[in-house]
Structure formats: structure tokens, C-alpha cells
């Protein structure tokens, strides 16, 4: 059995990142013969996040000293491993806008690798989940890009937030990051940046990068207002946005009148556990009383077997809602949790240490490190879909956390010719015996 598809193999994805990083503008005024090439610095950081080890560079330098080669050279084509402090200093001045296109590069490989169809939903559309998260917080360390929040005790908390878009599908385990937009303090502006402004910057860039995809933006109630809905429509994007009637007076009034004349459709189903699933929907309702814009609305309530309310939410969409598709639309609307649970939560709590201070820097380091960490996560998600050896290893060990512990331990002790050989070494006892006999 072939281990990997060429366009989605580990070496291909790492090579894709390297090609992009070779185009980075070097912020250093002088780069001497003894300096670390910028591409090596960026690839070293990516390797650190790939193996989920903040101390990786120290161990690889030790291997380089003793073996004259390291896993960063065999797997990431790094010619010279920098020290962690040097890496942070150099990356602090790199422009994040020059790193972001690597996500488009990787996504093109996903498209050509024939796995994109696995994410289709709602008659061939793609759900792009959009949400924000905080990835740095401190009362002591700050940079010019830090947002500021005044605390009750009068102190100031500095923090970095990110707005991210990820491709997901209900019931499908993988989540693929698409792009990100930093929410930060901009030079020369007194008013702080916010999620809505970040989204306004992100949407045009998103459409430009994926012009041929039938995209549905799935997001929370912050976005279910006329100006932002109009922005999505102007860019040809469909949407499913949380919209509770109590937050929209015109919508509430419309629904009240439509219910009185029996114009609100409804479906009720009871599952094997005795829980009731109640769906309501209506098309062409007002989002704001002074706006001509009409949207479509649907809601869902879960009544547990004891009669108590288990879940309730409602959404607006530009897609026409019918008795045939309302349940699928609810699935799509509820999938928004995946970007929090399977993306942000994984980055924070499953080995990626996104909130760990890998280096805050004085300029742009915090966001640069976030992007490289997110890129490593993206590569992992793709490998989970296509790398047969990694799939076998996970099945054998049964825990992603333990699997990466074993991988980390080995790469810090021995040098492996390739990613494939590393995984094969863990899986094959005979290979390990041979390695010990010859090593």
C-alpha cells in the first residue's frame, strides 16, 4: 500500500512551506556568511511546533554537534539550527502578511490531493467557520500591537486576539484552518481593533484566495447585523449566522405576525431516547425595520426525555429554508462549536501550547509564532487524513498525546533519514532491532 499521496505527503507539505519561506523579506540589514538563513529560522520554528516541543532546537543542536546532522536537516532541510533566542530575535521583525499566503499554498495542495470533497455539505457547499480567540495575555509583557483591557483593580491586561476561519463538516473529525486575521492595536490609531473590523479585512482576502468555492460563512450572533450581512452578500458569500429573535426587534415582530397567520413552518421528531427535536423556519423576514434586506430564519429546540430544555438556538441564512433541508441547516449552524472545540481547544490543550509564551517580542513575534503553530496544526490535520503510517501509529498507540510523546522522545535522541523512516521505526520491531545493531 502506498503510504502517502505525493501532493499531501509530509515532505511535500514541508517543502511547500519552505518554498513560501524562501520568499520572506529578510529584516536584517546585513546577513553575513555566519548568519542563519531566514528560511532556516522559519523552518526551525515550524519544526518546533510540528514536534510540539519548545526545547526542540536545543536537542537538535546537540545532535548536530555529535552527529554532524540533525532531524531538522533530514526532515526540514535546515542547514544550520539556530538557538531559540536567535530564532525569536530574527522572527520578531518578519512581516506576518508574508507568512499568511502559505495557508493558500497548502490549501491548493489539499484541493489537488482530492480530499476536499470529504468536506462538502449542503448540496456541495463548504462550511467556513469563523470565530475569535485570545492566544496571549499578560500584565507585564506587551508590544505595540497588544490590545489593552483595564481590570477592576485598575491594572491593565495586555493581550493578543485572533480571528480565524476553518473548513469543517458536521460529523467529520478533521478541521482545516483556512486563514487568520490578527486583532491588534494599529499604529496611529487611538481606537482599539475589534472582531468586526478584523472580519471586514479578512472577507475580501478570503474571497480572493478561494474564488471558485461555494462558501457558507458560519459565525455567531456578533455578525448577524445588516452591514456585515450586506458585506457577505457583496462578496458572493452565503451565510448561516446565529440570530436570536430577542436580539433583533424587527425579526421578532415579523415572526410574531407570521406565526399568527400560520406562515412559520415546523417539524418535530422524537428520537430513540425519547428526546424531542423541534424545528421552525420562515423565509423572507426582516433583519432591521429600516432596511429593505430580507433573510431567511430557522430555529432548533431540543427537549430532553424529562421535559426540560436541552438546547435552543436560531439562525439567519441567505439559503432558502424548507422542510427538506432545515435539519441539515441546523447541523451546519451547530457546527460552529467545532472551531472552538476541535481547533482552538486543540491548539490550547492538546500539545500545541498556543497560549504558551514561545516569545512575545517587541514587534510581530507573537503573531508570527501563532501562524507557524497554526501551520503545524494544519499539516497534522492533513496527515491524519492521508498519511497511512501515521494512521497506523495512532491506531496502535490509541492516544494522540502519547503518540507525540514517543515521536518527540525519539527525534531528540536519534537522527532519522525521513519522516517515513521515523514512523516505520516506531511501528516495526525488526527495524528497531536492526537500528540498535548498526547504531
Image (spheres, rainbow, N blue to C red):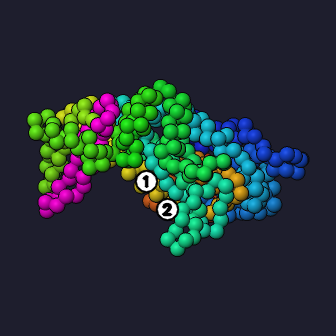
| 319 left or right, relative to 1 | left
Q: Which residue is mark 1?
A: 340
Mark 2 touching mark 1, by CB under 8 A?
no
Q: Which mark is residue 229?
A: none
Give percent across and percent down for residue 411.
Answer: 66, 58
**Looking at the figure, which quarter contains the C terminus?**
bottom right
Please give the count of numbered marks on the rendered protein.
Answer: 2
Residue at the farthest left position: 261
Visible in this render: residue 393?
A: yes
For disc 2, the neighbor class at 10 Å (few under 14, some 14 to 19, many from 20) is few
Give percent across and percent down for residue 318.
Answer: 32, 32
Q: Which mark is residue 349?
A: 2
> Magenta segment: does it hold 193?
no
Q: Nearer the viewer, mark 2 or mark 1?
A: 1
Camera-nearest residue between 428 and 351:
351
Q: Residue at x 35, y 39 (%)?
A: 240
- SS at badge 2: helix
- SS at badge 1: helix
Picture quadrant where residue 285 is located: top left
Give percent across and percent down for residue 20.
Answer: 68, 38
> Magenta segment: does it hold 309?
yes
| 53 left or right, relative to 230 | right
Q: The magenta stretch spans which residues?
A: 288-316
| Mark 2 vs 1, N-terminal side | 1
Visible in this render: residue 76?
A: no
Q: Residue at x 69, y 44 (%)?
A: 95
Give percent across and percent down for residue 387.
Answer: 52, 44
Camera-nearest residue between 98 and 173:
98
For disc 1, the neighbor class at 10 Å (few under 14, some 14 to 19, many from 20) is some
| 284 left or right, relative to 202 | left
Amino acid at each position: 500500500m502506498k503510504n502517502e499521496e505525493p501532493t499531501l505527503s509530509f515532505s511535500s507539505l514541508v517543502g511547500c512551506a519552505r518554498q513560501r519561506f524562501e520568499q520572506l523579506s529578510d529584516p536584517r540589514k546585513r546577513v553575513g556568511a555566519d548568519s542563519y538563513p531566514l528560511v532556516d529560522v522559519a523552518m526551525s520554528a515550524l519544526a518546533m511546533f510540528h514536534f510540539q516541543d519548545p526545547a526542540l532546537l536545543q536537542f537538535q543542536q546537540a545532535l548536530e554537534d555529535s552527529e554532524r546532522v540533525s532531524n531538522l536537516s533530514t526532515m526540514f532541510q535546515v542547514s544550520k539550527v539556530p538557538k531559540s533566542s536567535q530564532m525569536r530575535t530574527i522572527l520578531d521583525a518578519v512581516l506576518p502578511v508574508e507568512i499568511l499566503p502559505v495557508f493558500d499554498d497548502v490549501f491548493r495542495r489539499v484541493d489537488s490531493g482530492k480530499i476536499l470533497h470529504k468536506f462538502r455539505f449542503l448540496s456541495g457547499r463548504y462550511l467556513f467557520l469563523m470565530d475569535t480567540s485570545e492566544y496571549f495575555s499578560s500584565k507585564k509583557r506587551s508590544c505595540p500591537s497588544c490590545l489593552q483591557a483595564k481590570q477592576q483593580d485598575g491594572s491593565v491586561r495586555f493581550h493578543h486576539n485572533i480571528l480565524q476561519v476553518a473548513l469543517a463538516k458536521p460529523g467529520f473529525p478533521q478541521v482545516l484552518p483556512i486563514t487568520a486575521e490578527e486583532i491588534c492595536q494599529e499604529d496611529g490609531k487611538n481606537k482599539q481593533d475589534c472582531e468586526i473590523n478584523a472580519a471586514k479585512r479578512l472577507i475580501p482576502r478570503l474571497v480572493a484566495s478561494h474564488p471558485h468555492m461555494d462558501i457558507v460563512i458560519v459565525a455567531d450572533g456578533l455578525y448577524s447585523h445588516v452591514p456585515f450581512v450586506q458585506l457577505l452578500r457583496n462578496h458572493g458569500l452565503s451565510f448561516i449566522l446565529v440570530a436570536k429573535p430577542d436580539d433583533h426587534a424587527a425579526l421578532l415582530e415579523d415572526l410574531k405576525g407570521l406565526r399568527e397567520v400560520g406562515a412559520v413552518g415546523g417539524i418535530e421528531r422524537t428520537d430513540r431516547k425519547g428526546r424531542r427535536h423541534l424545528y421552525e423556519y420562515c423565509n423572507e423576514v426582516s433583519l432591521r425595520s429600516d432596511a429593505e434586506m430580507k433573510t431567511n430564519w430557522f430555529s432548533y429546540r431540543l427537549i430532553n426525555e424529562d421535559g426540560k430544555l436541552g438546547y435552543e438556538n436560531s439562525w439567519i441564512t441567505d439559503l432558502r429554508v424548507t422542510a427538506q433541508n432545515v435539519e441539515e441547516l441546523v447541523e451546519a449552524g451547530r457546527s460552529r462549536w467545532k472551531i472552538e472545540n476541535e481547533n482552538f481547544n486543540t491548539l490550547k490543550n492538546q500539545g500545541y501550547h498556543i497560549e504558551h509564551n514561545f516569545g512575545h517580542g517587541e514587534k510581530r513575534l507573537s503573531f508570527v509564532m501563532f501562524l507557524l503553530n497554526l501551520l503545524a496544526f494544519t499539516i497534522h490535520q492533513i496527515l491524519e487524513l492521508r498519511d497511512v503510517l501515521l494512521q497506523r501509529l495512532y491506531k496502535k498507540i490509541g492516544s494522540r498525546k502519547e503518540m507525540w510523546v514517543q515521536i518527540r522522545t525519539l527525534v531528540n535522541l536519534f537522527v532519522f533519514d525521513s519522516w517515513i523512516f521515523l514512523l516505520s521505526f516506531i511501528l516495526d520491531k525488526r527495524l528497531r532491532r536492526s537500528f540498535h545493531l548498526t547504531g
